[in-house]
């Protein structure tokens, strides 16, 4: 059985019996790249937790008209409601993080500027596109939210009530799932050069516990993907 193509649509699909899509980028992909035709079926999702099967009724250079076939609830539920607070790193490595943590089921991504950040800018629209494509390809029904770039101190001043926060750093004590059962977690992960001594002191002042994933030194992207895997798959 051929796997159906799957796309994110920024519309509430739960009450759509007929849908008209006019976005030029989508039209170009569907008509010219994928060469969809009337009668073809595709899966759409809107981030609500379900997939929606639609049938193409008409496709042209101006729009695509689709009719609703059925709703398919997604049964996957991440084990942890995880917020990744990631210091920005080199573009290709940061984009790898976005792709993989989306596949693993992270709920929110908060990019931060830290003392040793080499990269000080973030293309938010490109980041959202990478997240969208990763969700489409990995059958995730909910897209993680990504916020605009902020300073570390700003994030620490606005932590979410009821969420447990930790810091990853080689200087911390070993992290163990056996002793950590929180379901709402925020994890701070530093840049290529790690957290500065001033930042470690800032975490301590804010009572954010510091943990290590082991004696080995991990690259920032490896730490982000490893910790997300541990929280979502290791429990």
Image (tube, rainbow, N blue to C red):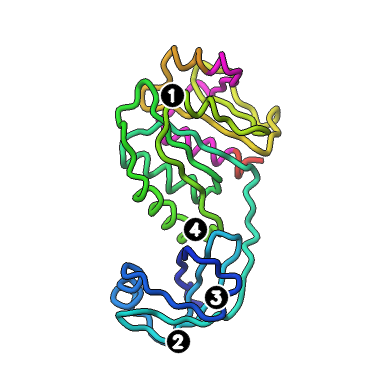
- Residue 14 falls left or right of residue 112: right
Q: Residues within 10 Å of mark 3 (few under 14, many from 20)?
A: some
> At x 61% / y 44%, what residue is drawn?
233
Q: Secondary structure at mark 3?
A: strand
Q: Which of the numbered marks, if any, corresponds to residue 57? A: 2
Is residue 208 rendered magenta in the image? yes
Q: Nearer the viewer, mark 3 or mark 1?
A: 3
Q: Earlier in the sequence, mark 1 or mark 2?
A: 2
Q: Secondary structure at mark 1?
A: loop
Q: Nearer the viewer, mark 3 or mark 2?
A: 2
Contact between labelled residues 3 and 4, with CB atoms less than 8 Å apart: no
Report the residue marked by disc 4: 138
> At x 45% / y 83%, what residue is drawn?
56
Residue 162, x across and y down, in percent: 68, 33
Q: Tell me how far mark 4 sits from mark 3, CA to CA.
A: 16 Å
Please report the bounds of the magenta region as a residue range: 203-230
Q: Tell me how far mark 1 sits from mark 2, CA to CA.
A: 55 Å
Report the residue marked by disc 3: 53
Report the residue marked by disc 1: 217
Q: 156 or 220, which lies in front? A: 156
Q: Quadrant of residue 74?
A: bottom right
């Amino acid at each position: 059985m051929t796997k159906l193509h799957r796309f994110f649509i920024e519309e509430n699909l739960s009450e759509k019996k007929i849908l008209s899509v006019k976005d030029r980028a989508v039209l170009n992909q569907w008509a010219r790249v994928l060469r969809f035709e009337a009668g073809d079926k595709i899966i759409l999702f809107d981030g609500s937790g379900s997939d929606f099967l639609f049938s193409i009724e008409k496709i042209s250079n101006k729009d695509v008209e689709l009719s609703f076939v059925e709703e398919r609830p997604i049964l996957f539920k991440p084990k942890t409601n995880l917020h990744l607070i990631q210091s920005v790193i080199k573009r290709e490595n940061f984009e790898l993080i976005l792709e993989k943590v989306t596949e693993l089921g992270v709920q929110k991504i908060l990019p931060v500027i830290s003392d040793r950040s080499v990269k000080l800018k973030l293309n938010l629209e490109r980041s959202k596109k990478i997240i969208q494509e990763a969700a489409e390809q990995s059958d995730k029904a909910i897209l993680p939210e990504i916020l605009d770039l902020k300073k570390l101190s700003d994030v620490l001043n606005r932590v979410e009530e009821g969420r447990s926060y930790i810091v990853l750093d080689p200087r911390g004590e070993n992290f163990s799932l056996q002793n950590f059962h929180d379901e709402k977690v925020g994890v701070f992960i530093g840049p290529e050069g790690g957290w500065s001594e001033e930042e470690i002191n800032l975490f301590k002042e804010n009572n954010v516990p510091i943990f290590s994933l082991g004696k080995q030194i991990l690259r920032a992207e490896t730490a982000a993907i490893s910790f997300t895997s541990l929280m979502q798959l290791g429990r």
